Image: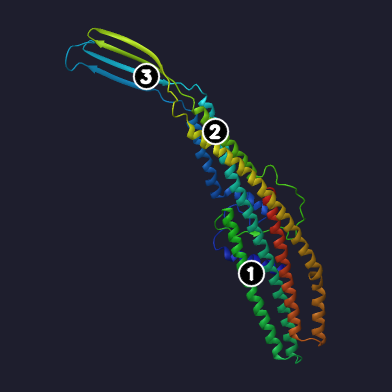
Amino acid sequence: MRAAAIALGAALAAAAGAPAHAGAPAEVTADQAVALYRQTSPRLAASRAAIDVTAADLVDASLYPNPTLSINTTNIVQGQDTFGHSQNLVGVDVPILIGGQRGHRTRAAEARIAAKRAEVDVDQARAEIEIRRKFLALLAAQHKAEALAGALDDARAVRAIVAGRQQAGAKSPYELERTDLAVASLASKHDEALTDVTAASGALAAAVGIAGWQPRAAGPFEPPTVATIDQPAADHPGLLAGAAAQAAAQRDEAAAHADAIPTPSLQVQGFGTTDPEGIALTVGVAIPLPLFDRNQGAIARARAQHRAAELEHRATGAELAGDLARALAALALRCDAVARFRAGAIERLPRVRSMAEASYRSGQGGIVELLDALDAITEARLRDIELVGAALDAEIDVRAAARGR
């Protein structure tokens, strides 16, 4: 196994082709890979920048409406002068928000920012779950490569025995040729497994967001403990995002009702005449009459969005509960499958190997039987890796449904 690990490490170093990212460790656990993603991922940084775009709504919400300045001049062009030759008018209209629109708009903008932040957190949580899956794929590929490296070492040891016996005249050339064929087949499978390790390592690096990095997965590769979780956590990103969207829709509806309140304008006008010379001042108030447009469309849209967000939140909770129940059942079945296989197969491997070698050495069995036994042992080990990987993947499904990340 030590030789297999050395060979696997050499293959990863050779396949990297480019220097590792500065500061990135050569070996990582799943939690460390997720932490690196949070620190270095350019995709995550781009997603978080979308929050700043939404935050611009807060600036708009805090602004007062602009006043209106008007300047007019009136001159006599024909007929009798009735108002003093010329008249100049200067007016200012200042809208006055009397319905608390700024406060409602500000709270609505803050709610939309919170909803966007929760939405980005959902995407981040999904990416972290995907990183854990890619880490598991790399860990399983490493164990498969190590198992095949150990099987290759065993086959080469058998070849040395067969070659020695052939030189002593105890065995025929066929047995050596048959052994060489088995060695070549295992070497090909081992090379393919190393390629799979390199591909899985690159996939993990791409998911984390570090170019030119070829990490090695570190950590235990054993079936997990069956979890006893009743329902998704209250801080599940999907549930928090649903609640934030519902709150944002509710704030938008309140802001739409506030915008329906007419906004009066304070009007101040001054005008002067030139002949005779004089200045007059007019002060008044203009109020829109909400006879037709009472912001019904925006209110109806906001109310429908609020209802849709509420239903979406309920649907997300029900779906997560169903996903959790299915994931827990699958995890229990897969852990049982690992336990049964290990009791029925893995525990027999040492006895099968010793019996096959003893039979060959005593002459009771031939090289075909010995190689078949070694091949069965290798297949059992690979099957165990496959079953353990499936159980660990089911644990990730439980994690995704229960915690979201």
Q: Nearer the viewer, mark 1 or mark 2?
A: 2
Q: Judging from the image, what secondary structure is the residue with disc 3 in?
A: strand
Q: Give the quarter of the image for residue 188.
A: bottom right
Q: Residues within 10 Å of mark 2 (few under 14, many from 20)?
A: many
Q: Nearer the viewer, mark 3 or mark 2?
A: 2
Gap in angstroms between the C-alphas marked 1 and 3: 80 Å
Q: Amino acid at mark 2?
A: Glu
Which residue is pictured at 67% across the width and 79% down the height? 183
Q: Which residue is disc 2 drawn over? A: 253
Q: Which residue is disc 1 drawn over? A: 193
Q: Amino acid at mark 1?
A: Ala
Gap in angstroms between the C-alphas marked 3 and 2: 32 Å
Q: Judging from the image, what secondary structure is the residue with disc 2 in?
A: helix
Q: Nearer the viewer, mark 1 or mark 3?
A: 3
* Up/down of 351 relative to 56, above or below: below
Q: Which residue is disc 3 drawn over? A: 92
Q: In this view of the protein, which residue sits in the foreground, 18 or 360?
A: 360
- Is tag 1's residue or tag 3's residue first in the polypeptide sequence? 3
Left or right for 89, reference 146: left
Q: Amino acid at mark 3?
A: Val
Left or right for 140, reference 272: right
Query: Which residue is the extreme one toward the front?
Result: 291
